[in-house]
């Protein structure tokens, strides 16, 4: 079924197609000048020292774990209310994800008080996820990390250009990962970025991104090097220049796209605050944020009631989603012994409403009318 209002919409025009075409015509399509240009844009726009383009965010998170020194036998504290990649990356490094609860329906990010309770002598790092692009309680997280000598990895996939007390998300911890998957704020199909302010960490990520090789094909093609050594067991996590060229166009549009999303969210808040039995997570936020998605939490009923509300909304032509089915309930994680009451409440009562820059005020009014009828009608 084609929805009257989809969950998200690509902010594409002819520029992305032209950029991809020009790159193909240039004769260099793998990691090269476009990746370098994109990395430089990230450094400038995110006020960060180093950016390393990646094939996707999952790979960037994998490297975040490796360069943070996460090793077999270690534990990494992370939320369960996130996409599976945020926990899987810990296991790729041979360590164990320790699932931690969120604050609650009003703030659906990891709860610093719960983090403290999960720390053992095996804990190596805290991996935070800035849900929907809204910042985690980073002052508290960083204070805990400092006290216990832990690394902090930011899954900033939802929050490009979002801020926390004047700092861009992804620049507060030791390193961070962004995604360019098609439904993200920066869309290229697949793609991602690793960022860090620490040279040693960023150099290591760059090395591991491409087989641990000391030079890249592009450098050799340019005559800057004729040979290479392999000094680490690395991977092929490279982005190619075609995707990077698309990402550059997307990044240029991002500030204006985010301004439009803010207007959409403001109208949502205005209308949804009159709807009974609904909590809007992060309603009290005053930071500049990316508004990657528009989550709401229903305050009554069961998971079956939530699903039937979603069905009614779909019948009215509005696509919704759930962010997220909690990871600790998936078959491969059900033996990890996680007890997370706030996460379980939110995963069973959350509905994600459409959010994108081209959503009109009339669209928002229609959606909220449909949501109110489905919940309270
Ligand atoms: C919070 C979060 N982390 C990680 C990922 C993985 O990103 P990618 O698809 O670029 O690997 C996603 C993707 O949906 C995500 O939402």
Image: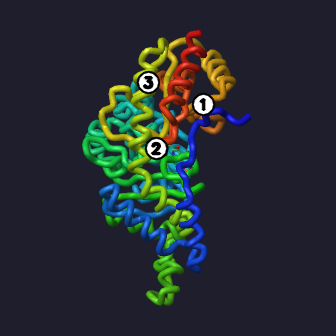
Q: Residue at 49% across / 67% down in the picture?
A: 208
At 48% from the left and 56% from the top, the residue drawn is: 250
Q: Position of residue 356 (x, y in %)?
A: 51, 40
Q: Are marks 3 and 2 in contact (CB under 8 Å)?
A: no
Label 2 neighbour load within 10 Å: few <14, some 14-19, many 20+: many
Q: CA distance from mark 3 to mark 2?
A: 17 Å
Where residue 67 sits, quadrant-wise, is bottom left
The C terminus lies in which quarter of the figure? Answer: top right
Q: Which residue is pictured at 36% across the width and 44% down the height?
A: 162
Residue bearing the label numbered 3: 280
Q: Earlier in the sequence, mark 3 or mark 2?
A: 2
Quadrant of the image occupied by residue 271? top left
Residue 320 got which mark? 1
User: Residue furthest toward the right?
Assistant: 1
- Element on which disc 3 rests: loop
Q: Which mark is residue 216?
A: none
Q: In the displayed image of the protein, which residue is found farthest to the front?
A: 362
Between discs 3 and 1, the one toward the N terminus: 3
Q: Is mark 2 within 8 Å of ligand 1?
A: yes
Of 181 and 343, nearer the camera is 181
Q: Residue at x 50, y 72 (%)?
A: 212
Q: Of label 2 and label 1, which has the lower sequence position?
A: 2
């Amino acid at each position: 079924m084609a929805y009257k209002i989809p969950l998200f919409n690509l902010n594409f025009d002819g520029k992305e197609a032209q950029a991809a075409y020009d790159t193909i015509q240039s004769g260099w399509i793998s990691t090269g000048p476009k990746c370098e240009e994109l990395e430089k844009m990230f450094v400038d726009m995110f006020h960060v020292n180093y950016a390393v383009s990646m094939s996707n965010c999952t790979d960037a998170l994998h490297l975040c774990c490796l360069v943070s020194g996460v090793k077999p036998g270690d534990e990494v504290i992370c939320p369960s209310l996130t996409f599976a990649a945020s926990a899987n990356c810990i296991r790729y490094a041979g360590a164990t994800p320790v699932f931690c609860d969120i604050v609650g329906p009003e703030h659906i990010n990891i709860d610093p008080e719960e983090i403290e309770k999960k720390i053992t002598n095996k804990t190596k790092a805290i991996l935070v996820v800035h849900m929907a692009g809204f910042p985690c309680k980073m002052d508290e997280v960083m204070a805990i990390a400092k006290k216990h000598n832990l690394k902090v990895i930011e899954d900033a996939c939802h929050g490009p250009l979002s801020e926390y007390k004047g700092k861009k998300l992804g620049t507060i911890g030791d390193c961070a990962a962004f995604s360019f998957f098609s439904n993200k704020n920066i869309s290229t199909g697949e793609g991602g970025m690793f960022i860090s302010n620490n040279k040693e960490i960023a150099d290591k990520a760059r090395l591991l991104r491409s087989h641990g090789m000391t030079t890249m094909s592009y450098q050799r093609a340019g005559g800057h090097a004729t040979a290479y050594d392999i000094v680490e067991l690395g991977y092929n996590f490279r982005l190619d220049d075609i995707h990077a060229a698309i990402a550059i166009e997307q990044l240029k549009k991002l500030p204006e796209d985010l301004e439009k999303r803010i207007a959409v969210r403001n109208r949502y808040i205005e209308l949804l605050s009159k709807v009974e039995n609904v909590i809007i997570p992060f309603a009290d936020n005053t930071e500049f944020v990316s508004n990657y998605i528009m989550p709401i939490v229903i305050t009554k009923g069961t998971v079956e009631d939530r699903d039937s509300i979603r069905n009614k909304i779909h019948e009215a032509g509005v696509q919704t989603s759930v962010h997220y089915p909690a990871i600790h309930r998936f078959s491969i994680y059900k033996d990890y012994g996680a007890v997370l009451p706030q996460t379980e409440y939110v995963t069973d009562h959350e509905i994600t409403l459409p959010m994108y820059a081209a959503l009109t005020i009339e669209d928002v009014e229609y959606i909220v009318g449909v949501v109110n009828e489905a919940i309270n009608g």
